[in-house]
Amino acid sequence: MELTGLRLLALEDEYLIGLELERIAEECGAKSIHLVSAIDELTIWIDSKAECDIAILEVQARRVSSLPLASILQQRGVPIVFATAYDQQRDGVDGFTGTPVVVKPYGKNEIMKAVTSILGSSEPTRVRQTCLM
């Protein structure tokens, strides 16, 4: 079960969900996981010019939108998966056509399908099918 060499950036303000996301990423072989719980932490990370292969971002963390920062990451070529507690965003987030959304609570299957979807053919060896169980 691998996400071979994947460097993951995640914004999740719910502690237990963040821990579960870390567990899923580690189980699937992510190279590194940088978990932040607030928009200001994400801003500092982005300003540091650190690199990641994919970002899983909560649409709203502590009632603050992550969308402006998601736009910056996309401009840098970082694939994004959104996570949300709001069912009405299940079919997408305005301004981010084609960006997968997972609705909380989510499990390994939902996250891995979204990651596979966004990485698509550009990173075919990163996500192995054995992680989709």
Image (cartoon, grey):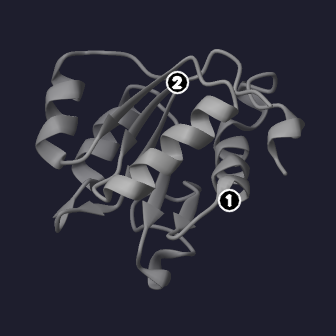
**As displayed, is residue 22 above or below residue 85?**
above
Q: Which amino acid, by three-letter code, is at mark 1? A: Glu
Query: Left of 49 or right of it: where is 17?
Result: right
Q: Quadrant of residue 69?
A: top left
Q: Quadrant of residue 30?
A: top right
Distance between the alpha carbons at the discs numbered 2 and 1 = 19 Å
Rendered image: mark on residue 66? none
Give the residue number, with chain letter if any, for mark 2.
Answer: 53
**As displayed, is residue 73 above or below residue 12?**
above
Q: Quadrant of the N terminus?
A: top right
Q: Residue at x 70, y 32 (%)?
A: 28
Task: Decide which of 128, 93 is in the foreground and name it.
Answer: 128
- Front of the two marks 2 and 1: 1
**As displayed, is residue 114 above or below residue 77?**
below
Query: Left of 26 or right of it: where is 65?
Result: left
Q: Residue at x 51, y 46 (%)?
A: 21
Rendered image: mark on residue 110? 1
Q: Which amino acid, by three-letter code, is at mark 2? A: Asp
Coordinates of residue 34 in the picture (x, y in percent): 37, 28
Q: Residue at x 46, y 56 (%)?
A: 82
